[in-house]
Image (spheres, rainbow, N blue to C red):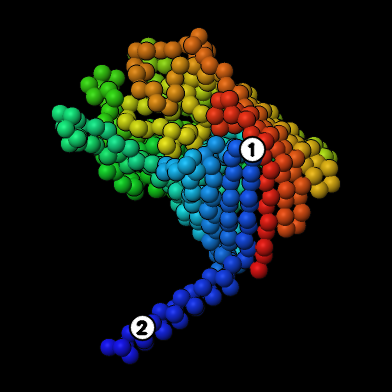
Amino acid sequence: MEDRTKAYFKLTNCIIFFSLELIFCSISSIEITPSFSLNSYSFGVASKFKISPNFFIYHKNNFFKTNYPFERPVIYQKVRNKSTGVNEQSYLSINDDMEKINIWFGRRYLDSGPSVISGLFISPESPAVDNLSYQFKLSDKIKLQSNIIRLDSRKEILDDGDGLDRATYMYFNRWYYHHRVELKYTDFLTIGFKEAVVSTGENRSIEWYYLLPLGPFHTEQLNQEARTDGLYDASNLSGIGNNDNGMVGLDLSLLLGKNKLYGEFCVDEFQLDKEDRKKMQDVFGFLIGFSSSKENIDWSIEYAYASPWLYLNRGKFSSPDVKGVSLGLRGPNLQSLSIKPQFSFKSYKIGLNTQLWVKGSQSLDTDWDAWQNKIDYFDFNDFEIEHRYQAFILSEGKKRNYEFGFSYNWLYEGSMQIYCSATYQMQN
């Protein structure tokens, strides 16, 4: 028995040794990013494991104080002493030699279309999400992008148990399906056709009919059994309803030398029937932007609009968000203006991010009540004005970057941060 124990011990040591050797030998790069401000901090460690020229794994941990001004929101839940740690990104990437096929699986940051600052379907400001994504180059002029995103689960109380701590809950699983077909019409004009749907329901799993590469989601909604658990309008006074919140849209990008004019449009609700149009308004959003890159100056400006009821639906928890943070615009019933200039001097960059929102009375938490409840498209009588700013100086090197910056209202109203950060890269 003693000899067998020693043999197991030696075998375990060998496995651990070779596993560590395999891991460290396959690491192609390590990135360490400590950041500090007057009353906050962040410490990120990222590593890239290159298994082959066409296959790598990327992982990033981040330990931070919850008021740190990240450029994109970082989702967390458990907090101790106002600090927490998360797996910010962790995914594998596979592609072919010609990069006509790209596949990603795990948690990473996504976007959709030409937008630089905001977005209607998947915004460059959205948090990292758990997803399976792929991009196929169908021809020299056509690309297909598809994303299957797992949103956070929610629960709804069914019975409070007479206040005796014996409550019964209804648990909702939530999924966000998105695909985009890009057509490079000419060298200066690119058009993207896109569609998305949030599916939700009690213990709901992936719906295979939403995985069809080119199948319109709305067609599948009409031809599949509707899920109606948790509808806000259970009486169906507004017609046949279901839990799935579908949206369609398009984007376009027009290149004019080193300048780019771009836009995005989304339709959430559109009534074909004349009688229904008297009771339900069209629900939509749009974005228009301009970016320029000339010599030492890069800058972008965007205006975005979300109509009342955008992203809201009669289905329970059917908005495209993760723990209340939207994957698109911040919510319904708002306007925003964003400006983002950046100046370059040798190895230095100076940047400024400025954003202004005018918000109406609705948010992602608003219960759906759109039937026979039309709201003027520019009704901001009960409006709130929010704004945030960030300025920074960045020094870039081959293996290390340094940044010094200032932010105001970046995460919370009234918050101000003066921070400095460094990024160190080590390559194998």
| Residue named by callout 1 | 38
The residue positioned farthest toward the top in the image shown: 381
**Residue 394 % position (x, y):** 74, 44
Q: CA distance from mark 1 to mark 2?
A: 52 Å
Depicted 188 relative to depicted 331: above or below: below
* Residue pointed to by mark 2: 8
Name the residue rendered at 68%, 56% in the picture. 424
Residue in view at x 66 percent, y 68 percent? 428
Q: Along the horizontal axis of the image, is 315 left or right of 53? A: left
Q: Tell me where residue 160 appears, x and y as whole percent.
A: 19, 30
- Do we see residue 70 in this rendering? no
* Nearer the observer, 93 or 345: 345
The earlier-in-sequence mark between 1 and 2 is: 2
Q: Position of residue 210 (x, y in %)?
A: 38, 44
Secondary structure under badge 2? helix
Percent x, y for residue 159? 18, 31
In the image, what residue type sits under mark 2?
Tyr
- Amino acid type at image mark 1: Leu
Label 1, secondary structure: give it: loop
In this view, the residue in front, 310 or 51, is 51
Give the quadrant of the N terminus.
bottom left
Q: Which residue appears at 49% of the width and 36% of the height?
A: 327
